[in-house]
Amino acid sequence: DETDLLLLDLLAENARRSNVDLAREIGMVEGAVRKRLSRLLADGYVRVVGSRSLRKLGYESEVIVGIQVQAGASDDVVRRLRALTAIQGITLTTGRYDILVRACFRSRAELEELLTSTLPAIKGVARTETSYVLSTPKRSFDTFDDDDAGAESAPYPALRVLRAPYDSNASRETWWNG
């Protein structure tokens, strides 16, 4: 209902808000908010995850890699990609590439290793094309149902923390005006 949607929107803005604060904002008692949140969590409408600031952890670059895969090799390629720590996300797609991956690196040497040694060594990878991410003026961590349920073994099924994994160097004004 509308109240659940409002709760989800408020949590998307700040997932650390207290039930008391949420209740005050939407005009309900804390117990009713707690009950609604419990139901939303149990029904899978929202999850709790931590989002690391990769920039603060020493990562300096992010790339998107399009991968064309040989026929019948997608499962094996995805299995190998999931084992790589630099890979932050894997998406199976239609179009020019069969797989798009998001990868982050602490150094240019790590990026070069992935592109020149690691990916070419994966059986079934036919072709790759890499795009260097200059900035990310908008990032959402909303998901489609259970698409990523098995991707990571998160111990808690709960409320997803919505914030960028690192601070962008470019401001919104720079992006729109520059």
Image (spheres, rainbow, N blue to C red):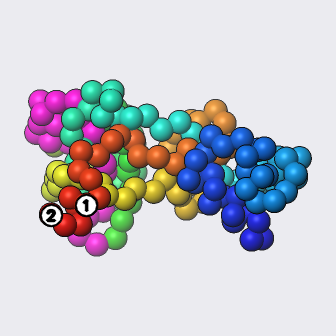
Q: Which residue is drawn at 12% across and 33% down?
A: 108
- Disc 2 crowd, CA 10 A, few/some/many (<14, 14-19, 20+): few
Q: Nearer the viewer, residue 92 or 124?
A: 92
Q: Residue at x 21, y 35 (%)?
A: 60
Hey, which quadrant is residue 96 in on the image? Answer: bottom left
**Could you say which disc has been placed on residue 173 in the image?**
1
What kind of residue is marked 2? Answer: Gly
In this picture, which residue range is highlighted in magenta?
A: 95-119
| Residue 37: x %, y % from top left | 77, 50
What kind of residue is marked 1? Answer: Glu
| Residue 18: x %, y % from top left | 71, 41
Hey, which quadrant is residue 86 in on the image? Answer: top left
Q: Element at badge 1?
A: helix
Q: Element at badge 2?
A: loop
Left or right of 37, for residue 114 = left
Left or right of 20, for residue 144 = left
Q: In this view, does 136 lie above or below 117?
A: below
Left or right of 23, for residue 143 = left
Quadrant position of the C terminus in the picture: bottom left
* Marker count (numbered): 2
Q: Residue at x 36, y 65 (%)?
A: 93
- Residue 12: tell me if it is visible: yes
Give whichever of discs 2 and 1 has the lower sequence position.
1
Q: Nearer the viewer, residue 120 or 6?
A: 6
| Residue 36: x %, y % from top left | 82, 54
Hey, which quadrant is residue 98 in on the image? Answer: bottom left
**Could you say which disc has been placed on residue 107 in the image?**
none
Q: Nearer the viewer, residue 169 or 134?
A: 169
| Residue 6: x %, y % from top left | 69, 64
- Disc 1 crowd, CA 10 A, few/some/many (<14, 14-19, 20+): few
Q: Which residue does the numbered mark 2 point to in the structure image?
A: 178
Q: Residue at x 26, y 32 (%)?
A: 59
